[in-house]
Amino acid sequence: MKNYGIIEKYKKYLPVGQATPIITLNEGNTPLVFASYLSKLAGENFEIYLKCEGANPTGSFKDRGMTLAISKACEEKATAVICASTGNTSASAAAYSARGGIKCIVLIPSGAIALGKLSQALIHGAEVLAISGNFDTALELAKEISLKYPVTLVNSLNPFRIEGQKTGSFEICDYLGDAPDFQIMPVGNAGNITAYWKGYKEYKTGGLSKKLPSMLGFQAEGACPIVKNKPIKDPKTIATAIQIGNPASWKSALEARDESNGLIDIVTDNQILEAYKILAQKEGIFAEPASAASIAGLLKLIKNGYFRKINTTNKCKIVCILTGHGLKDPERAIKSVKKPKLLRPNIKTILKEIGY
Ligand code: F0G
């Protein structure tokens, strides 16, 4: 049986040819879940959908870009790839490199990546190097090494990453029959907002969708260089995936924002944590904190009346991208809720506790 991931499905729109070996884990085709609680909250003219990218093979959207980046690296006979990462890129690079049979080198900011992600990079056999610096420094180093040595950079500066990731917007259009009115997503290094916007534009140009969404990006308050319009030296947020002070795709994120008549705004860590719990407890979806920034942004915009000015005859469709799975960061989940009580193994004690 043939494996079937985003490259097979969207070959026509991707830079692949006969000679490209397809290194895939059957990524993509992730659920677009109708969010009943959030839709009700937004009002009767709204339909909110959640694109659950945590359902990808390594638990994040990075797999869409990595299948292409590693396939192309293998086509070009690269023997090694390198990336800097806040965790998910390294997990994905490590898995696809293992599958492609090439060496993977990972630079991570020491102590600043979630446990699940670190475990993935390690178990897939990557050479993981923790540096005493932040993501931005790690990325500078990875770039420099890739320029001087025969190692391919697989951060989103690699154009194949963006090409693969744009398939997320293709899937949304295929599922909804058109692009949504708004798309909300977290912004870190800003590759994903760049990729989605590219995808939406290509689908519209190809006649596969009629409209373009407004792109609404959210950064964490302590890591919001784009909103502040200047790099942040020491970015800080509980959403470690987007703890980035100097995004590589800054310029194209601004283009996506401005061409789409969208916005890039901030949410606080408290708003992220609140959204994180709402998602888990009202929609039944466990996404990592950075992904919850999408929902925190949605709630912020509902509250401040942003969508009120929207005037559509049909229902207004909003897609929120949930970029990574909640299991990536189990420590954060446990810190965010009450611990289980320890009880004696006695039925009376248990019944009393649960109110019977
Ligand atoms: N959400 C998650 C879960 C991420 O891991 C990232 C980025 C983003 C959102 C932001 O996407 O960078 O394209 O704007 N993670 C990178 C990494 C930086 O190394 O895993 P972006």
Image (cartoon, helix red, strand yellow):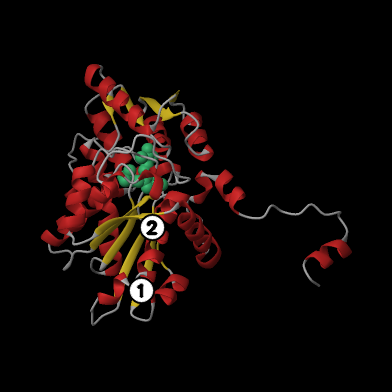
Q: Is residue 129 left or right of residue 201?
A: right
Q: Quadrant of residue 306?
A: bottom left
Image quarter hosting the C terminus:
bottom right
Q: Quadrant of residue 21?
A: top left
Q: Quadrant of residue 131?
A: top left
Question: How far across and how far down the image is residue 338, in percent?
Answer: 66, 55
Query: Tag 2: residue type?
Result: Ser
Q: Is residue 13 above or below residue 213?
A: above
Q: Is residue 305 above or below residue 185?
A: below
At horizontal 82% and vertical 54% (from top left) the residue drawn is: 343
At horizontal 28% and vertical 40% (from top left) the residue drawn is: 247
Q: Give whichever of discs 2 and 1 has the lower sequence position.
A: 1
The residue tagged 2 is: 294
Query: Tag 1: residue type?
Result: Glu
Residue 61 seen anywhere in this rendered image of the structure? no
Q: Marks 2 and 1, how far apart in space? A: 15 Å
Q: Which mark is residue 201?
A: none
Question: How far across and how far down the image is residue 59, in percent?
Answer: 44, 46
* Dot 2 crowding, Cα within 10 Å, few <14, some 14–19, many 20+: many
Tell which of 344 and 28 is nearer to you. 344
Question: How far across and how far down the image is residue 201, in percent?
Answer: 16, 57
Ligand 1 quarter of the rendering: top left
At horizontal 26% and vertical 80% (from top left) the residue drawn is: 314
Q: Is residue 265 left or right of residue 241?
A: left
At horizontal 23% and vertical 79% (from top left) the residue drawn is: 312
The residue tagged 1 is: 47
Residue 70 seen anywhere in this rendered image of the structure? yes
* Dot 1 crowding, Cα within 10 Å, few <14, some 14–19, many 20+: some
- Whether the residues at callouts 2 and 1 have beta carbons within 8 Å, the answer is no
Tell which of 88 and 230 is nearer to you. 230
